Image (tube, helix red, strand yellow):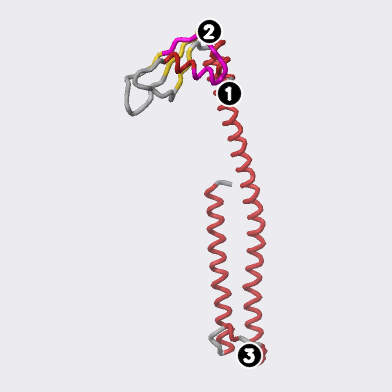
Amino acid sequence: MTEKDVLQSLSDYSIFFTEAQEEFNSWISEVAKALICEDPAEFSAEMFEKLTKEEISKLVFSAYQDISIFLKETDNMMRHVEELKLCLIQSQNSVVKLQGELIEAKSEQMESDVQNTVNAENMLVFGLKETGVENLCDKVDELFQQIEMKPRFEGVRFEKKSADRTRLIKISFGNSNTVYQILIK
């Protein structure tokens, strides 16, 4: 069942309930007319006792017809709602499956990215603040001391110096194993 079918069904239900409400209100108006009472809140058993047997029979039969139609359609709707619930469950299962596949694909991509990074002999460091006169090697050494490592490296800042942002640093190592050791820390 497509989304369009579901929306059409819900629209049909809305129309049915609106029409049923109109039918019941019409029946109440018939009763009010027969009882010569405009306010249904004022209906009483004594008022109904004043009606003739024929008037009561017509009102009861009219109510019976409306209620029979309402019950038949409500029964059909209940079966249809169960079908809609099954379709919704299937759709949700499909979404969950697609989410799982997406997560798996992203995980594989991340593993591939890590492998590519590990096979490289360089790293990029973002956000290491610049000072007016800086000793880049000392700053990077401090960074590695935080993760208890002391690798051999060469570091250089990229891009033109700007007051708006911090330039990134390219750190080159002698081998890819050093990059791997840093990444697993």
Q: Quadrant of the C terminus?
A: top right
- The numbered dot on residue 108 is 1
Seen in the image, is 174 located left or right of residue 42? Answer: left
Three-letter amino acid code of the residue under disc 2:
Asn
Q: Nearer the viewer, mark 3 or mark 1?
A: 1
Residue 135 percent across, percent down from the top left: 40, 15
152 or 26, which lies in front? 152
Q: Is residue 160 above or below residue 9?
A: above
Residue 124 percent across, percent down from the top left: 46, 18
Seen in the image, is 114 located left or right of residue 162? Answer: right
Quarter of the image where one finds residue 54 = bottom right
Residue positioned 48% across, 10% down in the render: 153
Quarter of the image where one finds residue 164 = top left
Return the disc, 3 or 1, that comes first in the chain's sequence.
Answer: 3
Q: Secondary structure at mark 1?
A: helix
Residue positioned 54% across, 72% down in the render: 22
Disc 3 from disc 2: Cα separation? 100 Å
Whether residues under marks 1 and 2 lie with C-beta atoms below 8 angstroms apart, the answer is: no
Q: Is residue 23 magenta?
A: no
Residue positioned 36% across, 27% down in the render: 165
Q: Which residues are magenta?
A: 142-155
- The numbered dot on residue 175 is 2
Three-letter amino acid code of the residue under disc 1:
Glu
Residue named by callout 3 = 47
Q: Secondary structure at mark 3?
A: helix
Residue 21 percent across, percent down from the top left: 56, 71
Q: Residues within 10 Å of mark 3 (few under 14, many from 20)?
A: some
Q: Nearer the viewer, mark 3 or mark 2?
A: 2
Return the disc, 3 or 2, that comes first in the chain's sequence.
Answer: 3
Q: Nearer the viewer, mark 1 or mark 2?
A: 2
Disc 1 from disc 2: Cα separation? 24 Å
